[in-house]
Image (cartoon, rainbow, N blue to C red):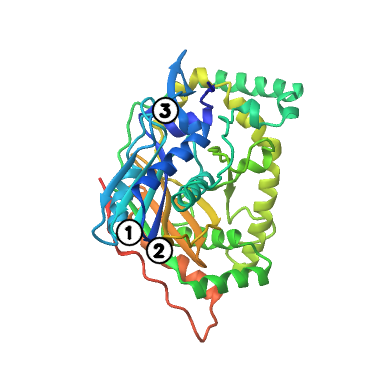
Amino acid sequence: MMKRPMAMFERAMYLEGSLHVNVTVTARLWGRISEQRLRQALDRVQAKHGILRCLLVRENGRPYFVEQATPPPIPLRIVERKSDEDWFDESTSDSLQRFDGSLYPLARLVWLRSELENELLLVCSHAVCDGKSLMLLLQELLLLCDQPDASIGTPTTLNGVEEVFPAKVLADRKLRRYIRWRVALLKFMMRFSRSSKKRWTYGAIYRNLWRLDEQASQMFVTRCKAEGASVFAALSVAILQAFHKVCGPKYMEKFEAPVDFRRYLPNLREDSLFAVAPTIQLSLDKLPGVDPEGTGFWALARAMKTDITKKIDGLETSIYPLFLGMEQLHDVYDRMFAQAQSQRAGRQVSLSYVGRLDMTQSFSDFRVQEICDITAMMSPTPANLVVIYSYGGRFYFSISSDESSLSRAQAEQIQQQVMETLLQCAAPVEKPFAIANSIPSATHAEVS
């Protein structure tokens, strides 16, 4: 039986079950889905991924992942589909429901069912799953629904620190001394900090979704290559400029982007679930050698590409001590959590670029028409999350926030500014493209 303690980063996503950070993907399918095959697919996926065979057990004041000989199955909820908009309301509601890891695995599936039109909503706790892992699970489920006997790989472990971190890092005595010194200093400083008893209130949570049509998307990618700028860098510039123009340059205190940590974990299998995603900061004001006010878009995009590359490369020297140092702070977790909750959220933006989804689209009995949405949600506020991905040749975008942190009116203005910038960059002046229609339900639904 496998067992390991929750890492600090995982605890920060699970938040002891009182709150939650959930990641969700919705796939729209055309064709016939077998309930028996779908349940069998869930069983196969659970049998492969060790973390989904676990329940959370508290020992010595700390939660542990403990594998179960007969784990509770991954929950499947079936809803009869009535319209093309049903999925959005179900996704919004379900993504805000917390997981009780002491009773069920930290994953669940919702099936919006009709004869030929279906949506699958996969929801996982961010404590066990990042965006890449989420898409891996979805791909495995679809494959097994189509081919019940297909191979999805051998069972995985629980991916504890000792398993996935490089042995030379764990054995580095100089690094361990440095970490002990930093941790001792942090704990000493925490003795003098006080948490405010004030509890912040936020407005209604909402999610705006939109997309760029295929022709404009492909022309934008082509232009990025011609200009020597990465797609992510160009998108980052467009989004930061839009926030500055709509909210003012100082309203958002920080922009950050999660980075795939796997490149620094050579022992981690590519087909394994993983949740940790360190972040880098994005800024137009601090790009070396450029003036954000007087520099053209593509020069900013090239400078942003250089800056992003430098910061990602620099993570190797900072992320190991950060992660290992956090593991020595479990005894002050409650104090850290209280301090975090006493601070006002909503003054920073997380920009999550999932990238191009290289998923199989056509299967024997069904076809993946669209990946409708990928998002992460947290209550009481998702606090300004922008998610971008491309599928089927089109870019998809979303902004999640609450009315107190960023009004829906501001989000819609930011959406418009971003699209105007992308279309200006991609389209010939004499033949501008029209913005693809926003998804109707996405711009009007909200959760109180």
Identity, as a three-letter code, of the amino acid under mark 2: Trp
Mark 2 closeness class: few <14, some 14–19, many ≥20 residues within 10 Å:
many
Residue 30 in the image, given as x and y percentages of width and height: 37, 62
Q: Earlier in the sequence, mark 1 or mark 2?
A: 2
Q: Looking at the rendering, which quadrant does residue 365 occupy?
A: bottom left
Looking at the rendered image, the disc whose residue lies closer to the viewer, 3 or 2, is 3
> Residue 131: where, in percent of width, then height?
51, 47
The three-letter amino acid code for the residue at tag 1 is: Ala
Above/below status of 114 relative to 335: below
Q: Tell me the quarter of the picture where residue 57 sits.
A: top left
**Secondary structure at numbered mark 1:** helix
**Quadrant where the C terminus is found in the figure:** top left
Q: CA distance from mark 1 to mark 2?
A: 8 Å
Looking at the rendered image, the disc whose residue lies closer to the viewer, 3 or 1, is 3
Q: Is residue 55 left or right of residue 185?
A: left
**Residue occupied by mark 2:** 210
Q: Which residue is mark 1?
A: 442
Query: What residue is shown at x 33% (from left), y 54% (from top)?
Result: 407
Question: Which mark sits nearer the N-terminus, 3 or 1?
Answer: 3
**Vertical position of residue 321 compared to residue 81: above or below:** above
Assess whether mark 2 and mark 1 are in contact (beta carbons under 8 angstroms). Answer: yes
Q: 10 Å neighbourhood of mark 3: few (<14), some, or many (≥20)?
A: some
Give the CA separation, mark 3 to mark 1.
36 Å
Q: Which residue is rendered at x = 43% and y = 32% of the image? A: 14
**Residue that mark 3 sits on:** 71
Which residue corresponds to the image point at 70% horizontal and 22% vertical from the top-left? 176
The amino acid pointed to by label 3 is Pro
Q: Is residue 77 left or right of residue 27?
A: left
